[in-house]
Image (cartoon, rainbow, N blue to C red):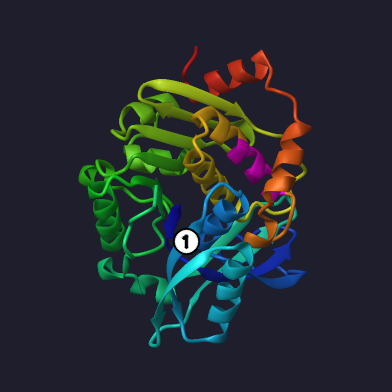
Amino acid sequence: MILVAGSANLDFVVRAAHIPAPGETVLGRDFKTYPGGKGANQAVAAARAGAATTHMLLALGADAHAAVLEQSLQQAGVHSHIVRDTQQASGTAFICVSDDAENAITVAPGANLSLRAADLPPLDGFSHLLLQLETPLATVWAYARAAHAQGVIVVLNAAPAQALDADLLALIDVLIVNQGELATVARHQGSIAECLARIAVPTVVVTLGVHGCCARCDGDITLQSAFAVKSVDTTGAGDTFCGVLVAALSRGDTLAQAMRQASAAGALACTRAGAQSSIPTQAELMAFLASQPVATATQSDALQRYCGFAS
């Protein structure tokens, strides 16, 4: 079983020609709300991947937004452990999505900040604990420490980016970051290879957008080229990657197999609007993978050079 502990937000999404610059007002077009939040997105992705039973620990307010977030998790087959905060509203995010599928996001955490160490359910039967950084850092510490002590594999998606103490990283088995988050955690602005060398976590997986992803696991490097798709909305693609990666690892897949599935799922998520609404099912993912060619040597060489593993 997988336990995801983290955030849930209701996303307020406006589509516009471009993302506003500071001080600029942009006339948008479509407006919709979608269930989101890094933790909830990752839980839905793991559940839809069909590999293992997925549970989620989250905090919600006593408001109408909470009902929407609960329903989305339930429909995805996620077993929810809800902390109810009657003093704060459920988390929200305000998102502008541009015509080139990029986004700008502002989060109002609300009840997400209510998660505390004492809220962690018993970890018996769980193989993986998946965490992010949209809940209090002290709570992330407490959950990682408890899981590490009980032999549960601790996975941290270090997003939103922030510098992390070495003592926290020592509790992490798998770290998932994008390129900017990698530099923040490594406290270094050099190549991906240089940044990876500075992080003392057994397995570090780095998502690289249109370039693909790479990983260092016990000194070995694994590369996965990106899948070509026509992007509509990149919101939630990284979270989809995280959830599917952990689901595949919990099933016993190799890191290379897990990265291929996670990359494909993240690519598919970019072809649809919204966060949880864009996450593919296992059947959709397998059909997509069956239609994709294996990366060529040229693609692999280019990715190696991009990451700084080859001159």
Left or right of residue 119, residue 3 in this image:
right
Is 166 colored magenta in this rendering? Answer: no
- Give me the residue at 51% from left, 47% from top: 242
Is 266 colored magenta in this rendering? Answer: yes
Left or right of residue 32, residue 140 in this image:
left
- Give me the residue at 72% from left, 64% from top: 15
* Front residue of this view, candidates 113 and 260: 260
In the picture of the structure, the residue carrying the numbered disc 1 is 55
- Give me the residue at 33% from left, 57% from top: 123
- 159 vs 114: above or below: above
- 260 vs 270: above or below: above
Counting from the top left corner in percent of width and height, residue 133 is at 39, 57
Q: Tell me which amino acid carries mark 1.
A: His
Which segment is the magenta one? 261-270
Residue furthest out toward the front: 125
Q: Secondary structure at mark 1?
A: strand
